[in-house]
Image: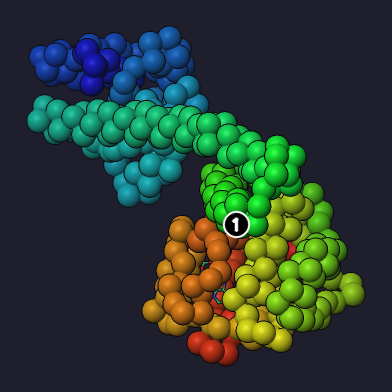
Amino acid sequence: MMGKATILVIDDEQAIRDSCCQVLIKEGYQTETAVDGDAGFRKTRELKPDLVLVDLKMPGMSGMELLEKIGDVDPNIVSVVITGYATIESAVEAIKRNAYDFLPKPFTPDQLRIVIERGLERRRLAIESARLQREKEMMKENFVTLVSHQLRSPLASVKQYLGVIRGGFAGEVEGKQKDMIERASKYIDNLLQLINDWLDMSRIEACNLSKKFEPVDLILILSETSQLLIPLADARKITIELNLHDNLPMVQGDRESLKQAFMNLISNGINYNRERGTVTVSTREEVNDLVVEISDTGIGISEDNLHFIFEEFFRVKSKETQGINGSGLGLPIVKRIIEAHNGSIRIASKVGKGTTFCITLPKKR
Ligand code: ADP
């Protein structure tokens, strides 16, 4: 704690106020006192003390009421309850209303010292943890800005230049050079995809997404995404089968991110399939939820690897996946999006047979 901690003692008994202050001043704390709940609340607002000792039974505003009000002034002010009528019920009630600890009367100076030290330590940790959280958010924000401006933008320009050179607009380019430029462009595409996936993931925060929630028709989203993926499926001779209900209720969600989630899942079903395989997208209605299943007849995932499948950057390394590009961020993005919609995602897979993702989303109420 920086400097001396300030402790406010709120009790209608003068003897308690005096004895507490005596012990606390000896320990080097700054003390203030108040004779009832109303005066205590006023002083809490003015002084913003580090810790407040609150008597539960006082004339006027009750200790319980005061506890809640102190929490509203500043949640980092630690409240410790002192009472002569300590019962389990009153302790539980006080803790529910924001008290950190409980000190039954009569108490010894040592008991008071211990409770105060513990309370102040808790305040220090809470403040430190909030500071670290803010720092982490700032670092993440700075990193996102760095990645999008300093990395993505120049890469996109390099890609454009390569396109111009390859097209012969900057002078003649012969066969071997064209091949090399093409390969370089592919590497840049993969890098850009990785950066975009990473940026998407950093931006998906449950609280940000829920601000954009609106009634969403899943059937429309599933048919649109499947339609968009037909060229990819055709190139790999894969059939997309849709098994969608006609009158499925709406979900409450963010259209674009749900599209992105299903896009990732269906494109995985295509990419990790075998030639002439199938990806089936089906929907089902349950009492409170809508269920979407995306099944493929592809290479499957072994049990060992299934445990890590939603981890960031995890990719299965095998003969079958060797030539397939990806960032290993697709499924973590899907999971974040679905969980931000209060839904869940499960996976079942058999090597050589295929994989099924089962997504559950709550119906719009
Ligand atoms: P990416 O596809 O970009 O590698 P994902 O997070 O979407 O990243 O998937 C992680 C890994 O999980 C993939 O690299 C792949 O090995 C495996 N995987 C995902 N979907 C399937 C699927 N439908 N069938 C088989 N393996 C899959």
- Whether residue 333 is visible here, answered yes or no, is no
Q: Nearer the viewer, residue 291 or 356?
A: 356
- Quarter assignment of residue 236: bottom right
Q: Secondary structure at mark 1?
A: helix
Q: Residue at 81% x, 57% y: name it.
A: 216
Where ligand 1 lies, by quadrant? bottom right
Tag 1: residue type? Answer: Lys
Using the rendered view, name the quadrant where residue 110 is placed.
top left
**Residue 262 occupies quadrant:** bottom right
Residue 17: give x, y in percent of width and height. Answer: 24, 17
| Residue 97 drawn at (x, y percent) | 44, 38
Q: For the point 49% across and 72% down, which residue is it?
A: 322
Give percent across and percent down for residue 295.
66, 80
Q: Residue at x 69, y 70 (%)?
A: 266
Query: Observer-nearest residue: 71 or 57?
Result: 71
The percent position of residue 242, horizontal first and vertical second, equals: 81, 78
Up/down of 101 relative to 201, above or below: above
Q: Is residue 180 above or below residue 171?
A: below
Label 1 sits on residue: 176
Q: Let me know if residue 273 appears in the view.
A: yes
Left or right position of 107 against 280: left
Q: In the rendered image of this protein, does residue 142 appear above or below residue 326? A: above
State the count of labels: 1
Which residue reaches farthest bottom? 353
Please name whichever residue, 29 or 350, is drawn nearer the observer in this view of the structure: 350
Q: Residue at x 70, y 63 (%)?
A: 263
For this view, does 137 lie left or right of residue 222? Answer: left
Way the structure is coloured: rainbow
Name the quarter where the C terminus is drawn.
Answer: bottom right
Rendered-image quadrant of the N terminus: top left
